[in-house]
Image (spheres, coloured by chain):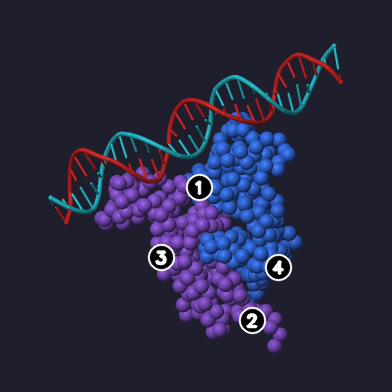
Chain colours: A blue, B purple, C cyan, D red
Amino acid sequence: MPRNGADPRTRILNAARTEFATYGLAGARIDRIAKSASASKERLYAYYSDKKQLFLEVLELNLREFASDAVLTDHDVPAFAGALFDHAVQHGDHLRMIDWARLETDGTWLPALEVMLGYRDEQVRRIRLAQAAGRVDASWEPAQLMTLVFGIASAWVHEPGVVLTNSGGSDSVAIAARRANVIRAIERLIAPSAEPAIN
Amino acid sequence: MPRNGADPRTRILNAARTEFATYGLAGARIDRIAKSASASKERLYAYYSDKKQLFLEVLELNLREFASDAVLTDHDVPAFAGALFDHAVQHGDHLRMIDWARLETDGTWLPALEVMLGYRDEQVRRIRLAQAAGRVDASWEPAQLMTLVFGIASAWVHEPGVVLTNSGGSDSVAIAARRANVIRAIERLIAPSAEPAIN
DNA sequence: AAAACCGAACGAACTAGTTCGTTTTATGTG
DNA sequence: CACATAAAACGAACTAGTTCGTTCGGTTTT
């Protein structure tokens, strides 16, 4: 855990990332972060004013990486969903942080999430383009479809049974199967057809 | 909040339900529960040995209500998804509790979740029946489809953008639109023989 | 009278954040 | 290269506040 050649500031930030992702804002321990970063609390508070601010810094960082990692390109929504799924698998921390932020929040903070909103709106815009290109059924309301894609890509992260028991396994075979199911689900969702209209 | 004519034990349990759903295990305050239940801490610890045990009691109760509320019947998976969605809307607490339990857990507890596993397995079995009845595409692996249905039905609960900002509104019109989208998504998923089964 | 209940106080353990003396590292100068 | 000086970092103790769980005398209910 201590393998961090970087300067204390980054060491602390990295330690905070796993600490907050694991225990949340309330459950995280400042001393544990400092120790795991091989740094002193004195340094921690020299760089970050607050426990909460450090938490928000981590959250924003995660959201930023998330946003730059999974982007809808070439009107290819299934591939986009696949990228979302892969990101969720490889960076489980990011999803956890988002959940922590959602649960531990009064609704009274907007600092980091403009990142998320900008990202979301951009992808929604691209869904609209994919619809114009005939790659996605036009009867979907873009923003709603976006939410569905997110929900499907992260279904295995939030599913109560699998998740609470650690059952279902995390071996690469099972993961590949899930990924294939995600792709297939999305393909079925977006397949253009002669269906009635919306809302 | 304090209007509870019941005996202290149930008053405490009810207060604990909203407290834990709101703040989680670590964030919940015993004094707040007691006060909100118009009971004394002395009574609380007379009935419940532990903060954690009270939390688990609440969780199990929620899972039980959840399991009896949304059941797959008549091979009608879209209706099942609708029921899941409705339950998520009307009992947001239950979903939050599940998320809290997932996040705040080391993986070292099985007390309450046998409820969830039994429920899950039963619904999976019914999906299999729906497939046999030709109402659901047989090429889906039942358990995987189950997870997808859950993910779709609760997509708006977990979607980062909507959820972190409280945007998107919770008016009945928006909710109805979401519900319709859930149904439509499921219908597209399960539609039999959309794929090349050759012949 | 006995049991259930309240209210208030208390102890012990934790924890965020601060302070301060000491040590290490970086930097510049002769 | 040697050396001085300042900034950066460490470590450990300390403050102040919070919170779980307990205890106990008094009050209401049965």
Mark 1, other Cα within 10 Å: few <14 / some 14–19 / many ≥20: some
Mark 2, other Cα within 10 Å: few <14 / some 14–19 / many ≥20: few
Residue picked out by circle 3: B65
Q: CA distance from mark 1 to mark 4?
A: 39 Å
> Residue at (70%, 43%) from the top-left corner?
A3
- The percent coordinates of residue B127 (x first, y second) are 53, 77
Q: What amino acid is at disc 4?
A: Arg
Residue picked out by circle 2: B193
Residue picked out by circle 4: A135
Q: What amino acid is at disc 3?
A: Glu
Secondary structure at numbered mark 3: helix
- The percent coordinates of residue A29 (x first, y second) are 54, 41
Q: Are marks 1 and 4 in contact (CB under 8 Å)?
A: no
> Residue at (40%, 58%) from the top-left corner?
B57
Q: CA distance from mark 3 to mark 1?
A: 24 Å
- Return the residue nearer the eye: B122 or B134: B122
